[in-house]
Image: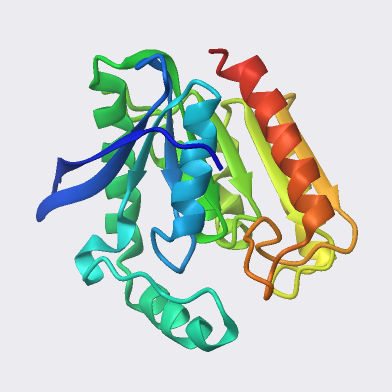
Amino acid sequence: MSQNDVTTLTVPVTGGDLPADLHLPASGQGPGIVLLQEIFGVTEYISGRARDLASQGYVVLVPHIYWRLGDQVVSEAQDGLPEAMGLLQRLDWDAAVDDASAAVAALRERDEVQGPVGVLGFCFGGGLAFAVAAATADDGDGARPDALVSYYGSALPDLLGQASKVTLPSLHHFGLADDYIPQETVREIEDAVTGGGRDTTFLTYAGAGHAFDNPSPLFHHEEASTQAWVATEQWLAEHLPV
């Protein structure tokens, strides 16, 4: 994973200041991407993916969505799952959607951002990204993203009632051996997000489980991870061209 310039800044939100990591590409400017974390927090994996995106020419902002819970980072091994699930249960979902939306607006306002702003999330962050797109669909204040990439969005089964609001170009990745989102649910999600002639790309991966992009041995599926990331880079090049 590539190196790049990174600084920590804060985004004013209801109740305080949201910390966020700003990763700049070598050029110092480009289209923007807000990258949203998994349930484990802003781990080295998430920061690594931010660096990968920055190396492609994007200005990447990684908000620390767990800041209201002490900004915790949890082990991605088996023994970390109970703690991570506990954090998720304590999370104020509506506040998280508002915080992530504020991050999109803040990134759009930065001088380094030239062009559109997308949102990309993994697992918890994938569902959160979808919720941001739905919640800001009618906003004109800069919080509405221009494109969405969601990796196995864990909240999507509960958000399908909002799918009609998400009309922006979107890319979805799901494994077909996901213990948390069974195949029939994946197909329900596909039907909901691809209807109405929307610009939606929906990709599935046989044999891949939940969080297959995460390098932890508990989750990683090398073939699916590689294929999905190549597809993500190609899709971003089309919808958020550098």
* Chosen colour scheme: rainbow
Number of disc labels: 0
The image quarter containing residue 229 is top right
Horizontal and vertical percent for residue 208? 81, 62
Can the viewer see residue 199 in this picture? no
Q: In this image, 138 relative to 233: left or right?
A: left
Q: In this view, does 150 lie above or below 222?
A: above
Horizontal and vertical percent for residue 24? 36, 27
Can you say which quadrant of the picture contains the N terminus? top right
The image quarter containing residue 201 is top right
Question: In this view, which residue lies farthest toward the left?
Answer: 16
Q: In this view, does 92 lie above or below 35?
A: below
Q: In this image, 152 relative to 128: left or right?
A: right
The image quarter containing residue 164 is top right
Please name the residue shown 61% across and 18% down the image: 239
Horizontal and vertical percent for residue 217? 69, 72
Please name the residue shown 35% across and 50% down the image: 97
Q: Which of 66 and 93 is in front in this view?
A: 66
Horizontal and vertical percent for residue 94? 32, 57
Q: In this view, does 94 lie above or below 8?
A: below
Question: In this view, which residue lies farthest toward the right?
Answer: 206
Q: Which of 3 and 164 is in front in this view?
A: 3
Please name the residue shown 75% across and 33% down the image: 231
Q: In this view, does 176 lie above or below 201?
A: below
Q: In this image, 24 relative to 174: left or right?
A: left
Can the viewer see residue 225 in this picture? yes
